[in-house]
Image (spheres, rainbow, N blue to C red):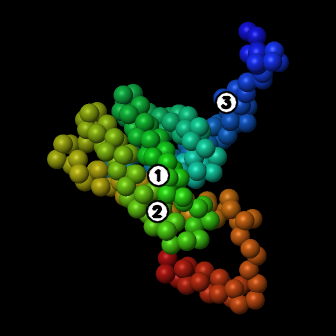
Amino acid sequence: MTSPVGPRGERLVVASRITRHDVLAIVTLGVLYYLAARIGLRLAVIEDNITPLWPPTGLALVAFLRYGRRLWPGVAIAAFLVNLPITNLPAALITAAGNTLAPMLAAWLLERVGFRQQIDRVRDVAALVVLGALLSMTVSATIGTAALELSSATPLEGFWTAWSAWWAGDAMGILVVAPVLFMLTTIREHPIPHGWKVLEATVLAGVLVVIS
């Protein structure tokens, strides 16, 4: 296969769409997603895969916003491998699709409204809560619960109970995990506090711990 030729006869170098760095990032994200999912499944309250806190969703959102949505295969494969042992093949495939599409939609919506990963504005907080968590996670909840219904894993009369628990778990994964990861990945971009700001941060952290 020859390289394309430019208008003046020069050879053009076409960069491949997926680089080795991308492959490494996809594999790394997949491993981290799988481990986070295994932790989340320990909190399951309905069947074996509906939990009130699903950390992998927050991880996926941060990865998509920080490094690009091209890393989606890592999420899709890991989600499939997590769900396959606890359901059947079609349901695992459908659930994995929902688990992938929801954070991708959240990342897309947040990018459209100019979301800043430092979360240093009120509009960033509102966008993360409304668009990232409450709205986007209806996708994974609807697809995942429908997959359970089709696989007969959840009785028909329990659809909305399962849906609400699934939605809440994914939304909490965004609200609890994503801000922490955003802080860790953007910490160098924040100015180093000094003086009264150090005392203020210490007091706020202490109050947060006590309330939690």
| Foreground residue among 96 and 70 | 70
Mark pair 1, 2: CA separation: 9 Å
**Residue that carries the numbered disc 2 in the rendered image:** 127
Mark pair 1, 3: CA separation: 24 Å
Q: Amino acid at mark 1?
A: Leu
Q: Secondary structure at mark 2?
A: helix
Task: Count neighbours of disc 3 (C-alpha within 10 A) and say few if under 14, some if 14 to 19, many if 20 or more.
Answer: few
Q: Amino acid at mark 2?
A: Ala
Residue 52: % across, % down: 39, 58
Residues marked 1 and 2 touching at CB (< 8 Å): yes
On residue 109, the disc is 1
Q: Secondary structure at mark 1?
A: helix
**Residue that carries the numbered disc 3 in the rendered image:** 18
Task: Count neighbours of disc 1 (C-alpha within 10 A) and say few if under 14, some if 14 to 19, many if 20 or more.
Answer: some
User: In the orientation shown, which residue stands out farthest toward the right?
Assistant: 10
Disc with the residue nearer the chain's start (2 vs 3): 3
Residue 63: tell me if it is visible. yes
Residue 147: % across, % down: 31, 37
Residue drawn where x is 57% and y is 67% of the image: 119
- The N terminus lies in quadrant: top right
Q: Quadrant of residue 12?
A: top right
Disc with the residue nearer the chain's start (1 vs 2): 1
